[in-house]
Image (spheres, grey):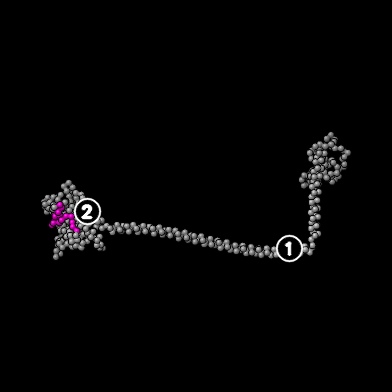
Amino acid sequence: MRAAYEGRTLYTCLNCNKLLQYEEHNKQPRRSHDCDASDLTLNTGEARNLIQIICATDIPGLAPICEMCSSELLEGMEGQLNRLDDECNDLRQLIEALEKMHNSTDPTTVKKRLASLQLEERELRDELRKLADEDRLSEFELQKAREERDNVSMRQEKLWENFRDIHRKLLDNDEVSRRLEAEKRYASEQLHRLSTKSAIDLAFHIWTDGPIATINGFRLGKLPDINVDWNEINAAWGQAALLLDVLLQRLKVEPSMFKLVCMGAHSYIKECRPSGSGREIPLYSSGGWRPFSGQTHSADEGAAAFVDILATLASNLVHLNRTLPHTIRKETLIDNGMQYSVKVQFNNEERWTKAMKCLLSNLKTALVHINSLKEQNPQPE
């Protein structure tokens, strides 16, 4: 680099920018092809190499450089030159080795070798074409296999859907089957329970442990301290008549003198006469008459007829080795040697109520006997 200073031209080192001393007599006229020291770039704008700048100048002023940088530059150039010499020697030795190798080779052998290699190349190209054809065929078969795999996958998915539907239906049917089986077992258990029980036992419940005997919840009797309405007593007589009629049908017994006509609280007993015009004897009372006043009660005759029919049932049970707890004698029932009349006339409430309890007790026992006979000799009801 140069600069003007007091009419003198100053130069700096291109490498280290150190100020240099320059003798003017060394200056030579600049040629058109010489490069200016300040011109450090090419037309392309790239930085120029220091060696290129030095080599392109004819005088030192165009490429100023200090002594130290020159020494370093020379050492670097000598090292590079030595490396280039070594590389040239290596290349020279390689050339000599190649020349020796080719000089010892027979041209005919080389031609044969070349022909063999060309033949091998053609064979390899043919094999390559065959392999390419096989590859295309394999790709085609692979595509077909993929399509078949996709079809199989679709069929498999559809089969799985059908399997799931069938399995769900199977589970539903199994659940229905188990439910029906449970219902069947329950029905069988209920049938067994019902078969071990008598319909009469379920239809008629007689209770004789209280002060007044009851049948199906209706009290048959009354006491001075327990007033029972005659409507309830009439209903109890109706239930007793219905039970006695069922027991007679079970034993297939038909009373010769009387016939029970069950009509609930208005049941009555009809006399059986050859002419067919028998009287209707009521088993109920209107309730307007005081039953224990010593006057005739309208239901007394019906109660006596009821006991007569019960005696007929008892005599048939005796033939079957079955007895009732209370002996029947005309219109009375015997308990512990005491006779209790079923009639209200000339009777008091306690004794009449006791007679009703004995009557219902006989009906309850007869029911048990007939059920036991049915179990020994089952017959369709």
How many other residues sit within 10 Å of disc 1, few (<14), some (14-19) or many (≥20)?
few
- Label 1 SS: helix
Measured as percent of width and height from the top left, residue 376 is found at 24, 61
Q: Which residues are magenta?
A: 322-336
User: Which residue matches tag 1?
Assistant: 117
The earlier-in-sequence mark between 2 and 1 is: 1
Q: Which mark is residue 299?
A: none
User: What amino acid is found at the position of numbered circle 2 in the picture?
Assistant: Ile
Measured as percent of width and height from the top left, residue 53 is found at 81, 44
Residue 328 in magenta?
A: yes
- Label 2 SS: strand
Quarter of the figure with the C terminus? bottom left
List the single residue furthest toward the front: 104
Residue 122 horizontal side relative to residue 286, left or right: right
User: Which residue matches tag 2?
Assistant: 206
The residue shown at (14%, 60%) is 279
The residue shown at (17%, 48%) is 223
Q: Nearer the viewer, residue 187 or 286?
A: 187
User: What amino acid is found at the position of numbered circle 1 in the picture?
Assistant: Leu
The residue shown at (79%, 39%) is 16
How many other residues sit within 10 Å of disc 2, few (<14), some (14-19) or many (≥20)?
some
List the single residue furthest toward the right: 25
Vertical side of 270 occupied by 79: above or below: above
Vertical side of 286 occupied by 119: above or below: below
